[in-house]
Image (cartoon, rainbow, N blue to C red):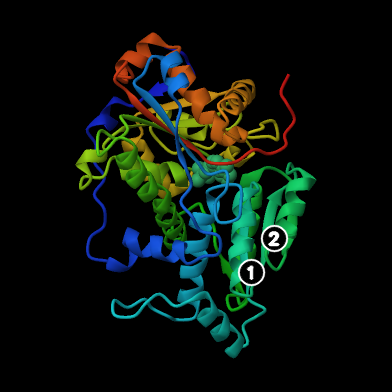
Amino acid sequence: MSPAIHLNPAASTWRYSPPTGNPFTAEFQIQTFHSLLPSYSPTPLYPLPSLAEALNVKSVYLKSEASRLGLPSFKILGASWAVYRAVLDFLDMTLTPDHPLPSLDEIKFLIQQKKLESLKIVTATEGNWGRAVTKMAGYLGLGTVVFVSGHMHPFTRELIENEGLGAEVVVVEGDYDKAAEAAKEFGEEEGMGKERLLVMDMSWEGYEKVPGWVVEGYTTMLAEYGAQISQQTDGGEGATHVFVPCGCGSIARAVTQYFKDSERENHHAQVVAVEPDSAACLQASLQRGEMTTVETGDETIMCGMNCGTLSGSAWGVLEKGVDASVIVTDKEAHQAVTDLEKEGIEAGPCGAATLAGLRRICGDGAARERLGLGKDAVVVLFCTEGRREYEVPV
Ligand SMILES: Cc1ncc(COP(=O)(O)O)c(C=O)c1O
């Protein structure tokens, strides 16, 4: 089998048990929240019959996050819910069953009334996340401080700086992990708790609540998928195999929880997580059986996935629930971008990496057979971003 593929056979029978008893984190409430944000509409699920034929599977669908709540990636789903919940918490506001969700205007008014306009949301990013957090903070009348790696393209930095009410972008020498450490330190600085609110999409010991809200936010994409696949197949079969990109692992965690949910028998599918060869921390962790950090540089076009360390709480789910981890190169991701373009799909390299991962598995007879990816397979690719500029690999 190709060294780029790691299989995790125990995952096929593992089931995720969702937390019970908290109706306020229920999916419908999160969907209601998203549906009330400016420019909400469900993103499309495209059938790709010619790809299915070429790969000798029953069908391939692609859920495209090219345009989500006014931004070109899925991240705003998690960022919006997490910023909203974190600010509510900060204001000591609780969600109650007999009261509708507080509106953005109500929260903004309260912030002004309490003279908290100088509160800064603090985070770290590879690009899309920081932009999404800044957009959502802007809806509440708040600014952000966003830590980025020195490897980030100046164009991406500008996009973050100019989003929402504007972000103060702090460039940190080194990779994403270094930027995340700096954000953590700044966000949690002693005595500054009242002016700074740390909202990160990766968790570590003692910092799990906010990243948990991020993962909850991503469930809207999955709920949409559930309705769409059922409609497109006339209530027939859902996916048998799903492909998701993996950076710090939060979106892969959301996808794994959904497709391995013990209460969602009719949606069970094998989960394949795709990583760039420059930052394959999930595969390294699966191989060693423990969370493992890998060195990363600036050398991938799959920028959003350029993380050397997994989110701690994502690892807890991915180690048990991911059926296969696949590593792809920049050239493969770029090829997939080009191929999807021919199908009329505008994808960036992170989103198209899922097709590159599918190709890798299909090109490896042993892995394909062990994953049961045969002619009856229904494949879903979670294409997490729209078209963007990048340096074409040679
Ligand atoms: C477009 C895109 N796809 C995938 C990912 C990976 O998501 P996660 O960090 O939750 O694994 C990111 C992260 O920034 C991203 O921007």
Secondary structure, mark 2, is loop
Residue flagged by tag 1: what amino acid is it? Gly
5 vs 177, left or right, is left
Mark 2 or mark 1, earlier in chain: 1
Q: Position of residue 166 (x, y in %)?
A: 72, 65
In-front residue for pair 203/88: 88
Residue flagged by tag 2: what amino acid is it? Glu
- Distance, label 2 to label 1, CA atoms, is 8 Å
Secondary structure, mark 1, is helix
| Residue assigned mark 2 | 163
Which numbered disc covers residue 339?
Answer: none
Q: Position of residue 63 (x, y in %)?
A: 46, 39
Contact flag, marks 2 and 1 (Cβ < 8 Å) = yes
> Which residue does the image show at 37% across and 15% down from the upper left?
367
170 vs 189, left or right, is right
| Residue assigned mark 1 | 138
Q: Quadrant of residue 134?
A: bottom right
Q: Is residue 358 above or below residue 38?
A: above
Q: Is residue 226 above or below residue 334?
A: below
- Asked if the beta carbon under badge 1 is closer than 8 A to the nearest atom of ligand 1, the reply is no
In-front residue for pair 374/67: 67
290 vs 127, left or right, is left
Task: Determine crowd level at label 1: few under 14, some 14-19, many 20+ residues with C-alpha closer than 10 A.
Answer: some
Q: Quadrant of the C terminus?
A: top right
> Which residue does the image show at 32% across and 21% down from the upper left?
371
In-front residue for pair 339/27: 339
> Which residue does the image show at 22% across and 60% down from the upper left?
20
Furthest residue toward right: 154
